[in-house]
Amino acid sequence: MSNRKRVWFEEAGRRLDPGLVEQLRMKRKEDPYETSKERLPVIVYYSKDSDDNKKKDLFTACQADNNSKLDKDIGRMASRGNLTPQMIKQIKDHESVDRIFYDRPVTALLDVASRQIGSVELQESAGLTGKDVTISVIDSGVHPHSDLTETSNRIVAFKDFINDEEKPYDDNGHGTHCAGDAAGNGQQSDGLYIGPAPEASIVGVKVLDENGSGRLSTIIEGIEWSISNKDEYNIRIISLSLGAQAFESFRDDPLSISVEEAWHKGIVVCAAAGNSGPEQTTISTPAINPFIITVGSTMDQNTKERSDDHIAEYSSRGPTVDSFVKPDIYAPGTDIISLLAPDSALEQELPEQVVDENYLQLSGTSMATPICAGVVAQMLEANPNLSPNDIKSILKSTSEPVLNDVWGYIEAGSAVEMATNYTGYQKAAK
């Protein structure tokens, strides 16, 4: 039996999340006596009985160390900041602290696709284009590409949590591609590269930087902003083509908690499963949450037929850390051609992927997720009374079981047909 003395962060229990413990362990190897002033980015969640006086005392304690600081509230029950290991040790047992998380990095994880899943047929036969439905694309921003701004500007709002700019832009390019995956109208391609919901409105929420990375706290801010502005912009859907490694249960994971709040506020959340397949138990956060719609990616072989499709090798597999079956649905995500943000990092890094000067070809569950979000917009246009739980149930029950997994391939026609007749609702004739 080992007699090794456990260090303080190993004895902290649930007060420190596993990701933070791992960071503290690495720092201790570099600095055994913890004399370094190097700080770690953290999120501090308050205890339920914490009041203003207790929070003020906590902030005062942190400011006593010139190298540590809590500097910004995230919602009502958490703050983010940068603390030295010694300060984390000092405040972990403070009466206002529930848990401390490592504010770890989060990364960004249409040719035949829209036609293959049946969305274009719905546009042509039923006139369902996602009109009057808004999708919040929480990503690297959105470039005002003509496929989103002509014949009318459908970028109804833009919020920048990275550089605090007011006008829409995308210095990475990932978010623009995702916006087009969901709602591009194909204006620059004579309708060839069209998304499922070409009349849906887009809210661009920039939480990822030029390199396509961000922090948990910034993503949470973007989700909280979308919830707060839900009614003003009619945000019915959040599309999250980003994620981070999941260390613990959905009940304790900060991103998972945030998307669940959005779901219960009536917003359909579509999140990318991740690109760490084919190994099992590789579903990222926030996709681990059992309430939201977790989207996996298929390879469609660039054909309209489904018989030759299969789950993409890179698409993350379940079960989740809580042993839930995921993904919930699959959509095309391989070699998807969508909108190009000019002068973006992706244009510079992937010049061979540029198509016809206005488009870019990318692969990943990042692409499958907004395609799913676009189908959801068509469903909500057909029946705006559907709840998030209704949407998820319909998508799963109408998916085609052509893939070797528990759930199948998204099928827009069947999903919209069931949505139209769900709970007796009939869409008024246009």
Image (tube, grey):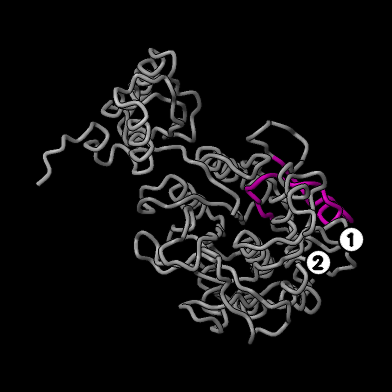
State which quadrant residue 313 falls in.
bottom right
Q: What element carries label 1?
A: helix
Q: Where is residue 255 in the image (x, y as percent from the top left)?
A: 47, 47
For the residue pair 400 and 54, the one nearer the viewer reads as 400
Q: Is 425 placed above or below 187 here?
A: below
Q: What residue type is labelled 2?
A: Tyr
Q: Position of residue 285 (x, y in %)?
A: 47, 53
- The reply to whether discs 1 and 2 touch (Cβ–Cβ < 8 Å) is yes
State the extent of the magenta-drawn residues as a range.
134-158
Q: Position of residue 331 (x, y in %)?
A: 62, 71
Q: How crowded is mark 1: few (under 14 residues within 10 Å), some or many (20 or more)?
A: some
Q: Position of residue 288 (x, y in %)?
A: 44, 58
- In the displayed orientation, state which residue is furthest to the bottom: 307
Q: Is 38 placed above or below 327 here?
A: above
Q: Is mark 2 on a helix, strand or loop?
A: loop
Q: Residue 148 carries which label?
A: none
For the residue pair 226 and 420, the one nearer the viewer reads as 226
Disc 2 target residue:
193
The residue positioned 34% from the left and 22% from the top of the image is 87
